Amino acid sequence: MTTVSSVSSTQLEHGAGASLLDARSEFLADEDATIAFGFKLARATQSAAGSEVPEAGMGAATAGGVIHLQGYLGAGKTTLTRGFLRGYGHEGAVKSPTYTLVEPYELARCNIYHFDLYRLSDPEEFDYLGTDNYFEAPNLCLVEWPEHGAGWAPSADFRIELTETDAGRTARCSALSQRGVQMLAALFG
């Protein structure tokens, strides 16, 4: 089930310097639905998503972007990321980078970096990770717990807030830049 909620052209200020341009929600019944939604999101971020999944290890051309993943522990952020990486043809394990802080997935046609900032005790610690180049286009960065790097981690183009419900979870997707608007339109188009 998809819920649509558009924001007026005056834009709502949401978070530190991020303007909410548009938002939509989707109900995810279980882990398989969360993986499928991540896969669908991956296809929405590709420059020319065809009908076929990219070959293993190849990836696909992308314009890049920063996607923030928010939700409580166990909400499904890494599960969604697993589906996202499958949408780019990654066939290996996908683990939470809770202790490593970042897991790089360097494919032939693109680079995807999965961050988990949960263990940062001070947002300034983000500056010491030495990952500035990771956030350059056309790289894609998925950032769990972005609030732990507030003021230091790059702003999101797209934000997904996962909240648990009795019957599953809800993914609230927010476009925070023009790139995010393109992602949202492709995801829910």
Image (tube, grey):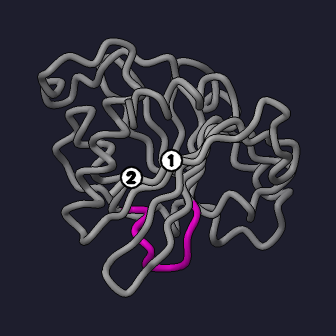
* Residue 69 position by quadrant: bottom right
Element marked by disc 2:
strand
Membership of 57 in magenta stretch: no
Residue 7 x, y percent position in the rendering = 70, 41
Q: Main secondary structure of the magenta part?
A: loop
Residue shown at 45% from the left, 49% from the top: 103
Residue 115 x, y percent position in the rendering = 55, 52
Side of 57 where 64 appears, left or right: right
Q: Amino acid at mark 1?
A: Val
Q: Nearer the viewer, residue 83 or 109?
A: 83
Q: CA distance from mark 2 to mark 1?
A: 6 Å
* Residue 112 position by quadrant: top left
Task: Categorize mark 2 by other alpha carbons within 10 Å: few (<14), some (14-19), many (20+).
Answer: few
The residue that mark 1 highlights is 4
Q: Amino acid at mark 2?
A: Thr
The residue that mark 2 highlights is 2
Q: Nearer the viewer, residue 179 or 10?
A: 10
Side of 149 where 47 appears, left or right: left
Q: Is residue 102 above or below residue 95?
A: above
Residue shown at 37% from the left, 87% from the top: 166
Q: Is residue 104 above or below residue 29?
A: above
Element marked by disc 1:
strand
Q: Disc number at residue 92?
A: none
Q: Is residue 116 above or below residue 155?
A: below
Residue 74 x, y percent position in the rendering = 43, 79
Residue 89 x, y percent position in the rendering = 20, 33
Q: Which residues are magenta?
A: 70-78
Residue shown at 21% from the left, 29% from the top: 57
Side of 15 where 144 appears, left or right: left
Residue shown at 81% from the left, 51% from the top: 14
